[in-house]
Amino acid sequence: MDHPRRDPRESAHDLSDCIVRIATDQDEAAFDTLFRHFAPRLKSYFTRRGGDPAMAEEITQETMVLLWKNAAQFDPSKASPATWIFTIARNLGIDRLRRAKRPSFDPNDPAFIPDAEEPPDRQFERAEVERRVRDVMDTLSANEKSVLMLSFYENQSHGEIAERLGLPVGTVKSRIRLAFGKLRAALDAQTGAAQ
């Protein structure tokens, strides 16, 4: 179905008709009319709001592509062609700003690089040390064990441990020092016996 080219300064009714023709017939002449009418206005809209010309051009192109794809969604009883098209453009601009504010993915970021796998002999040694520490921890009194667990495994400060256990800070410090001394002596004794 051929339609004659119309002047790009058409009325809202004529522009609505162009969108309908795109939706029903994929009319390239109607699209050309809309492109000539709206592309300069869209570019101007974004550059006046501080966007650089390249970004304004990209959003304009994306808007016109969406107009072509989504023309069937246009309802002339709900919005004028300009309102509908500028809403598409505004939403694309907002999406672009949101994407720009997100940190970009850097595959070399240490957070995304898996830890190097420990060699089997090191894994065995570490597991053996952990087992020995657990065995020695089981020989400590409940008070000694609790202050070491809170200090070294839960990373609590002396003040936090004192508050949690209802003890003076000095008592917590001396219990940690005594428990750590017993732990070290027992581990040293195990190491000496193993050699």
Image (tube, rainbow, N blue to C red):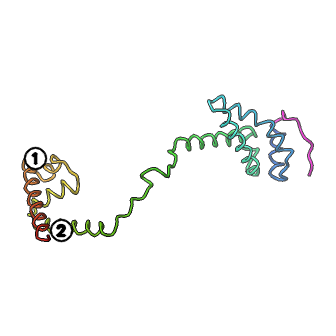
Quadrant of the rendered structure where residue 86 is? Answer: top right
**Residue 26: x percent and y percent?**
83, 52
Residue 169: give its label: 1
Q: Which secondary structure lies at badge 1? A: helix
Q: Which residues are magenta?
A: 1-11
Mark 1 to mark 2: distance in Å? 29 Å
Please determine whether, in this image, residue 46 is positioned above or below residue 24: above
Query: Which residue in the rendered view is the most extreme toward the top?
Result: 48
Query: Is residue 9 a member of the stretch shown in magenta?
Result: yes
Residue toward you, 116 or 174: 116
Residue toward you, 80 or 144: 144
Q: Amino acid at mark 2?
A: Arg
Query: Is residue 132 a member of the stretch shown in magenta?
Result: no
Local crowd size for mark 1, using a 10 Å CA cut-off: few (<14), some (14–19), many (≥20)? some
108 relative position to 126: left or right: right
**Residue 138: x percent and y percent?**
13, 68
Which residue is found at the position 63% from the left and 42% from the top?
A: 91
112 relative position to 85: left or right: left
Which residue is found at the position 80% from the left and 40% from the top?
A: 34
Please determine whether, in this image, residue 108 is positioned above or below residue 84: below
96 relative position to 106: left or right: right
Q: Which secondary structure lies at badge 2? A: helix
Nearer the N terminus, badge 1 or badge 2?
2
Query: Which residue in the rendered view is the most extreme toward the front?
Result: 195
**Residue 159: x percent and y percent?**
15, 46
Give the labeled residue for mark 2. Answer: 132
Please determine whether, in this image, residue 72 is positioned above or below residue 5: below
Q: Amino acid at mark 1?
A: Val
Residue toward you, 81 or 32: 32
Which residue is found at the position 11% from the left and 70% from the top?
A: 193
Principal secondary structure, stretch drawn in magenta:
loop
Quadrant of the rendered structure where residue 114 is? Answer: bottom left
